[in-house]
Image (spheres, rainbow, N blue to C red):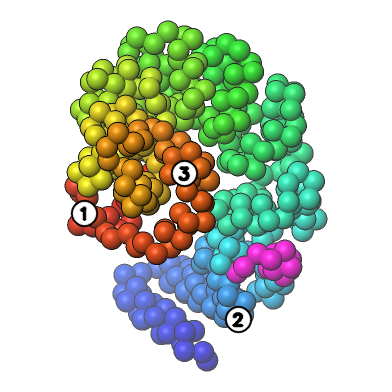
Amino acid sequence: MAPGIAIISRTCRLLSLLTLRKLSLPGQIRCFHINVVLCTKRNDDINIINAALQPKGLRLQKEVVKKLCSNSSPADTLQTIFDRANYFQSLGIPSTVMNKVFAAWPLILITDMNEIIERVQFWGEELLDMDWFRATTAKFPRFLAYDISTNIQPKIKYLEDYFNDQVVINQIIRKYPYFLISRISTIQERVNCIANIVTDRSDVFTLIRRQPRLLYGTSSAFVMKAAWLQNMGFDRHEIVNLLLRYPSIFVTSLPKLEAKLDWLVEAGYGNGNPRRALWINPPCLGYTVKSMKTKFHLMRDHLKIDIEQIRNCPSALGYSTKRLRHRIAYLKHLDIWEGPMQPSLGTFITKSDQDFCALIAKRPYQEYMDFIQDTPLHPIAGPDCKSSKGNLDNGIME
């Protein structure tokens, strides 16, 4: 007898002895022994199946094996699992992802193989591609649980009919497919709610194309954010303008939006006026307060950039710190960072490296690349951390 099974057997015998003292009727004792035998057999099946799956790197949860074995023998159950595992392996899906799929959607182990193949072919060949399918399956293990003809296709058709652009709809799905788990009526409600706020259908399409997560938001949240913007004095036209510049306003929680705007006002952006601070650069609401504080501290206290320049260029809060430090170091190296030739912050952060070299530094691009290669950046202590490592890189988006 295998060690694991022997332990289960001894445990069940001990349990039997302890429980028999409390049972008086012969029927109770007989039923108890039947349950112990069934319990031992189920555990034997679980151990046998998982032992057979181990060489493939697979392991099923106990409850999943119990359900499978209740309808078929361990041998048939193993064959069913192997059929699906071999198929997924042929698609290039690793065992770690298979374990996630089997845990998140156990019914895949009893779903007809032809149906599974049909779903894989739809996502990996007809609509998108296999690389996308593999990556999405790893992130969203229940992805194959949804029937194509009755569940997925009606939602896609609704969006294609509404926006009349199949190519962009496919791009939206590629970027954020998770909204497709919602009911079609819920998706319609979200689209209609956004349409009521921005009115123009082309604007609705632009917003969803730029931020597909809107299809997974809630209508009540959309209405709440629109009311928040109205309370700050923005009219409908201005609200649409803000959303087109930064549609993620509608999928960020209101407390987070308020905390970010409060910090921007406290730091002096928009001359301390919330409405102006938001209007100047709404994408600032996409960065964490911690990230913005750190960038502000770097520019003001370490790079010694004029405070008014910092406040007049809120987009710098999302700029790559590494690139910013390299560019300033290079301008200092050329002796044009300080004095009358000093460029404004907004002038040189909006340009590509090639344009920065040609228009600001007025030096060859390769010379700048060589300077970067030969000039290491030393860690800088931030206001909320001991060093800049992992904290002063690119803007941290939420």
122 or 9: nearer the viewer = 122
Q: Amino acid at mark 3?
A: Lys
For label 3, the SS is loop
Residue matched to label 2? 55
Q: Which residue is mark 3?
A: 362
The mark closer to the camera, 2 or 3, is 3
Please tell me whether mark 3 or mark 1 is closer to you in this view: 3
**Nearer to the camera, 144 or 159:** 159
Read off the residue under disc 1: 381
Q: Residues within 10 Å of mark 1 (few under 14, many from 20)?
A: some
Say if 263 sits above or below 68 in the image.
Answer: above
Q: Residue at x 23, y 32 (%)?
A: 307
Relative side of 90 to 363, left or right: right
Identity of the amino acid at label 1?
Ala
Q: Which residues are magenta?
A: 83-95
Q: CA distance from mark 3 to mark 1?
A: 32 Å
The local secondary structure at tag 1 comes to loop
- Coordinates of residue 174 in the picture (x, y in percent): 65, 43
Secondary structure mostly taken by the magenta-highlighted segment of the chain: helix
Q: Position of residue 76 (x, y in %)?
A: 71, 71
Residue 95 picture quarter = bottom right
Crowd rating for badge 3 (residues with CA inside 10 Å; few <14, some 14–19, many 20+):
few
Which callout, 3 or 1, points at the residue further toward the start of the chain? 3
Whether residue 393 can be seen here: no
Q: Residue at x 66, y 61 (%)?
A: 109
